[in-house]
Amino acid sequence: MAFGAAAGAACAVPGLVRAAERPPGGSLADLAKAKGVRFGSAVGAGKPGSLTGTLDDPGYRQVLIDECGVLVPENELKWYVLRPDAETFAFERADRIAAFAKAHDIALRGHTLLWHHPKWFPAWLSNYDFGSGPAGKAKAQAMLTAHIATVIKHYPQIDSWDVVNETIDPKDGAIRRTVFSDAMGPEATLDVAFQTARAFAPKARLVYNDYMGWEAGNEAHRTGVLKLLEGFRKRGTPVDALGVQSHLGTQDPAASAILGQPQEKAWRAFLDEVAGMGYDLLITEFDVNDQNLPGDVAGRDAAGAALAKAYLDLMLDYRQTKEVLAWGMVDKYSWLQGFTPRKDGLPKRATLYDDAYKPKPMREAVAAAFRAAPVRA
Ligand code: XIL
């Protein structure tokens, strides 16, 4: 949405974000759209009955309304939130986000139909006994397809889906083992997920999403993802794009020094191969982990902004890059506050806006990258 439009809209929160504080030059959604890219953010539904969650916070809602052309529920569509047991679908939390997006004319992405990583399966599912042989396989397939069909049908507004998330083990590049892959076979599990998604969302962008990065140490992960994407093409599995999570600095705190170094060549070679197979690219979970940078706020903000600009320039240079999603827009709500806390206990500055809803240098870096980006169809 345009800033001007948001300022006059009934949804604006008077007094919380004054027009004068808004960055000039248009919203990130508009700057991206001018280049054929969609910009948005992940958001949490908030805690029922409390004012601490992100959608419960009027200041945060205003940032989303002002800046985002697309939203994605941060956790609310994952099995561990949506599926308390084998029979139940708890849609209420994701429904809140879907209703908010609709009310403000913001598109919706889905994350994720199958986080194919045993760590993130609910306990009841990890312990589920499908039985063995063809009957077990059929039972597993029935549960997976019913889940995907039900969720997709519940959210017809979702036009871009992370169908499968993080299935490649970074250690050896193999497909991770779960109760589904044990019953159905690894490739078949993933193929069924994508085929079911295509059957029920024929027009949606279907994405394989993962966190392989350019940093040294990601070689096996990248190789595994390439092999997976090749396999999808060989078998005719309907996959449209690779989601590159882009949690920058998570694996390598010195990442800001890396772009332009030898690792960049390997990263571009990886992206070239992905694009060469006909896949689009999405940045699905952008943030910058300042875990190990010195505490000084101005220094951290400058480093985060520089890394964001260099990274987005590289990624947007690929005309295949069609969506850019931040993994949260305001520092205090970033998952990184709890995931890898700083040793000095200072809050991280991982996102585009500070805790007073003021744009940070990283917000300007993202805007500058969109302004500089080539146009795509
Ligand atoms: C994270 C959320 O941000 C946290 O709130 C939650 O506790 C764990 O998951 N890769 C993904 C995302 O694909 O789903 C993860 O989101 C971050 C890493």
Image (spheres, rainbow, N blue to C red):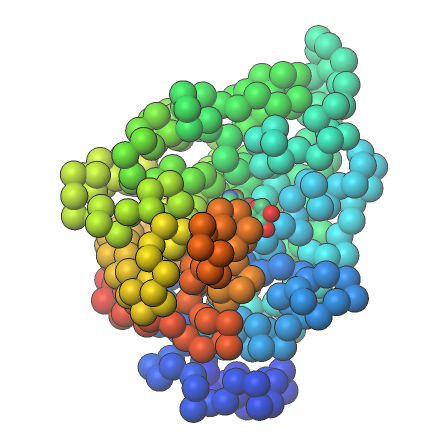
Residue in view at x 71 percent, y 70 percent: 51
- Classify residue 180 by image quadrant: top right
Vertical comparison of 54 with 126: above or below:
below
Residue in view at x 55 percent, y 68 percent: 106
Residue in view at x 73 percent, y 31 percent: 123
Question: What quarter of the picture does the C terminus occupy?
Answer: bottom left
Q: Nearer the viewer, residue 337 or 186?
A: 337
Q: Residue furthest front?
A: 344
Q: Residue furthest right?
A: 87
For this view, does 363 lie left or right of residue 195?
left
For this view, does 229 lie left or right of residue 113?
left
Q: Nearer the viewer, residue 61 or 38?
A: 61
Give the mark count: 0
Q: Position of residue 224 (x, y in %)?
A: 38, 26
State whether residue 14 appears in this view. yes
Q: Position of residue 22 (x, y in %)?
A: 43, 83
Q: Position of residue 25 (x, y in %)?
A: 33, 81
Q: Position of residue 93 (x, y in %)?
A: 72, 57
- Classify residue 114 by image quadrant: top right
Vertical comparison of 220 with 133: above or below:
below
Q: Nearer the viewer, residue 299 or 119?
A: 299
Residue in view at x 46 percent, y 26 percent: 169
State whether residue 150 appears in this view. no
